[in-house]
Amino acid sequence: MSKKFTIMTADEAAVYVNNDDNVGFSGFTAAGCPKAVPAAIARRAEAEHAKNNPFKIGIFTGASTGDSLDGNLVRAHAIKFRTPYQSNEDMRNAINTGDAPYFDMHLSHLAQTLRYGYLGKVNYAVIEAADITDDGEIIPTTGVGISPTVCQLADKIIIELNHWHPREICGMHDIYVPLDPPNRQAIPIYHPSDRVGTPYIKVDPSKILAVVETNLENEGGGFAPVDEITAKIGDNVANFLVSEIKAGRIPASFLPVQSGVGNIANAVLGSMGANKNIPIFEIYTEVIQDSVIELMKTNRVEFASGCSLTVSNPVITDIYANLNFFKDKILMRPQEISNNPEVIRRLGLITINTALEADIFGNINSTHVLGTKMMNGIGGSGDFTRNAYLSIFTAPSVAKGGKISAFVPMVSHMDHSEHSVSIIISEQGVADLRGKSPVQRAQTIIENCVHPDYKQLLWDYLKLSKGYTPQNLYACFAFHQTFMETGDMHSVDWRKFVK
């Protein structure tokens, strides 16, 4: 580490952050997020509130964060504004009660939106680093997110130098920030492994206010183990992709894959790796998960480009113990590159994301429970879905012990329209929506993806509906209304909703 910069405690650094400031934080998911300084800012907020002084800050992050950041700050009632994505339970509750104003946005848009000035000034950047040099070269840890842009825009930068991460991680990052219009040029990435930037974030050393030394492990936990439902979804995805190769609609050499975050995504990648009819493949995604690392070790994934290493601590420990093996197989980029529509379209990605809810015409709700309560946010799913070679959404057919159907007459909130969705897959089967009219899409989804308990209800709904896209506006939210009234969608009685 450089000896040029001022060493402070987290609490000493937090003194510089004031009410109404906007702060950009490093990381993407809990990976790469600072921990000590956000907690210290939360303590500062609580102290100011105890003196009846206002203290709230605007928060820009790559995506979701760890509890040290989102959790501590929201519990301290220190949120003026939050974007672009979150997954913390306390933050979610505050958003849904209106206590934490939240702007849900596509992840690829945030860095350039900040540079364009649409979201206001960035006063401070707080960056977790594995190393920093005298001339301002910052080596990120396991997540990049919007770090290069907030370092560029911020008046001052606070570095959390986290010694839990080895400085030898240097070389696993590719930092590239495109110029803004009208000077933007093509991003020269033609394969997932192409490097176009530098292995560090370069900043003016005079902007570095303080270095806070820590030794804190990542906060990200593992995902739920594969169960019967997620395993079946994974197998359905893998078998479908094999059928597409055999039909000649996917090249025999295969295409790079993007997969969302979570237990279904891990199960899908596991099934793809286990299916030897799928060639060795590459990943171009935002979140690199445990399953990707396991597939690298078994020579089923040869390279992974992402924005973060969102893996469990045992897995990151294994990576650090075997850097010689992993260093030329993993690359972490800023999210406006990992999620860039230009690159996604050029590479021809097979994209696989998870739906919270889908309707029988192929529209997807990724974000809102019963149309009103924010779950996490749209994240990067739209970046990938709208620009994919082949866009796939997965979902278990039911939730809450079968009391909720994931497939409904009309989604209660729409994040991805039918025009962006090619394939929907549940544990029940596969609905290929390509080239189908709305009625044909509905028939395909009901027959192949819907749980048997709800099939007849949805066939009956179609009979009640009219039009090119056959909907009945008196009855289209009957599933949701019935659940709110009874706690079980099974008890829908169409007679109550039809006039």
Image (spheres, grey):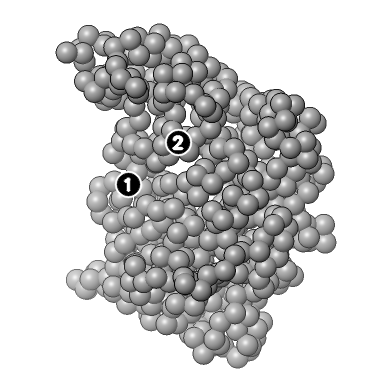
Q: How crowded is mark 2: few (under 14 residues within 10 Å), some or many (20 or more)?
A: few
Q: Do the residues labelled 1 and 2 touch (CB within 8 Å)?
A: no
Q: Residue 93 carries which label?
A: 1
In the shown orientation, is residue 392 left or right of residue 331? left
| Quarter in which the C terminus is drawn | top left
Q: Which residue: 43% across, 33% down?
A: 418
In the shown orientation, is residue 388 left or right of residue 12? right
In the shown orientation, is residue 465 left or right of residue 342? left
Label 1 is placed on what type of residue? Asn
Closer to the camera in the image, 463 or 210: 463
Q: Which residue: 59% across, 65% down?
A: 186
Q: Which residue: 34% across, 55% down?
A: 103
Task: Relative to 21, say whether 72 is above or below.
Answer: above
Label 2 is placed on what type of residue? His
Task: Relative to 282, say whether 406 is above or below.
Answer: above
Q: Which residue: 43% across, 12% down?
A: 455
Task: Relative to 471, say whether 70 is above or below.
Answer: below
The tag earlier along the polypeptide, 1 or 2, is 1
Query: Which residue in the structure is indicated by mark 2?
Result: 419
* Numbered disc 1: secondary structure: helix
Q: Residues within 10 Å of mark 1 (few under 14, many from 20)?
A: some
* Numbered disc 2: secondary structure: helix
- Residue 250: in sight, yes or no? yes
